[in-house]
Image: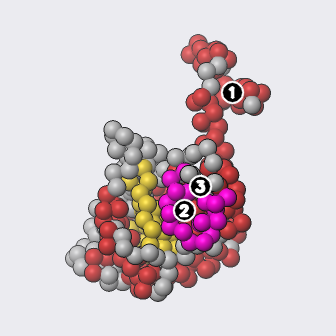
Amino acid sequence: MPLSVDDLVIGLRAGNRAALARAITLVENNGPHTGEILQQVSPDLGRAIVVGFTGAPGAGKSTMVGAFVKALRTRGKTVGVIAVDPSSPLSGGAVLGDRIRMSEHSEDDGVFVRSLASRGHLGGLSRSAAHVIDVMDAYGMDYIVLETVGAGQSEVEVADIADVKIVVCAPGLGDDVQAIKAGILEIADILVVNKADNPLAERTARQLEARTTGETGTKIPVMKTIALEGEGLEALTDRIETIAALQKQSEKGKDRPRKLLKAAALEYLGSELDRQDSPEYDALAAKIVRGEIGFEEAARAVLKIAAVEK
């Protein structure tokens, strides 16, 4: 017999892993009880520290995440890991590469790993990632680690979800540092040059230190690691804990619900418009083609139609 929402939430709060897995599946797939689950767990949110890892493919993000989880576990912290994988072209599901790479933690009850499909979402984050974070938070995880696909500058979306943003860079960026400065680097709270045993790592770190500032105009700290050997992870974990504590107290940290509300509203509106089969929409599209109306005016008309039909 399926668990009721009440039983599921009770199980989450009691630390039941089966309830956690079931609740994640429901919210990931936007099941019929998703809204009710999220509403019931809302008083339990805001305790976990959410750390986002992003960066270009090949920088060693997955190895870095595994090493970071290991460092947290040595400190007695429980960890939820959300690995956003590229979607399967056939099923739309996650390829599950990161779950395979995190297999060393599979027997650890203090770690729960879930792969989510990006489903073509531009930022590399699936639309349900924020909801899965909420479920893990309600479960009582101390840390929630989010690893994104690493598809390019659109990864700045992680800034709306994570308390601490880590951008992992590969040695030898060279002139590419300036080219990508205006996007993905500037969302970082910490820049990490991984594979620091590479001869080009020191030069890359110096280039990043010289050229990057954050949204507030302050210099972004640059750290070096060798994730495969765990080198530099203790210092990185210390820095993450310090930044997380400051973010939780700042106005910037309190802005996260507003950003997520905006994203949820846009997503809801998009899904409603996708479901609509209205002659009025067709008429507006035809007017655009004929040049009788602009896109902005048509968009305002669409919003009015959607509001009336609801």
Q: Nearer the viewer, mark 3 or mark 2?
A: 3
| Residue 158 visible in the current orientation | no
Q: CA distance from mark 3 to mark 2?
A: 9 Å
Callout 3: 10 Å neighbours few (<14), some, many (20+)?
A: few
* Residue shown at 38% from the left, 79% from the top: 70
Q: CA distance from mark 2 to mark 1?
A: 41 Å
Q: Secondary structure at mark 1?
A: helix
* Residue shown at 40% from the left, 76% from the top: 108
Task: Report if residue 10 lies within the magenta region.
Answer: yes
Q: Main secondary structure of the magenta part?
A: helix
Q: Nearer the viewer, mark 1 or mark 3?
A: 3
Q: CA distance from mark 1 to mark 3?
A: 40 Å
Residue highlighted by disc 2: 19
Camera-nearest residue between 188 and 67: 67
Picture quadrant of residue 309:
top right
Q: Secondary structure at mark 3?
A: loop
**Picture coordinates of residue 112, whole percent (x, y):** 45, 68
Residue 302 has which mark? 1
**Picture coordinates of residue 282, whole percent (x, y):** 61, 17
Q: Secondary structure at mark 2?
A: helix
Relative horizontal placement of residue 13, taking residue 145 as reference (left or right): right
Circle 3/circle 2 CB separation < 8 Å: yes
Q: Which amino acid lies under the numbered mark 2 shown in the image of this protein?
A: Ala
Residue highlighted by disc 3: 3
Q: Which residues are magenta?
A: 6-27
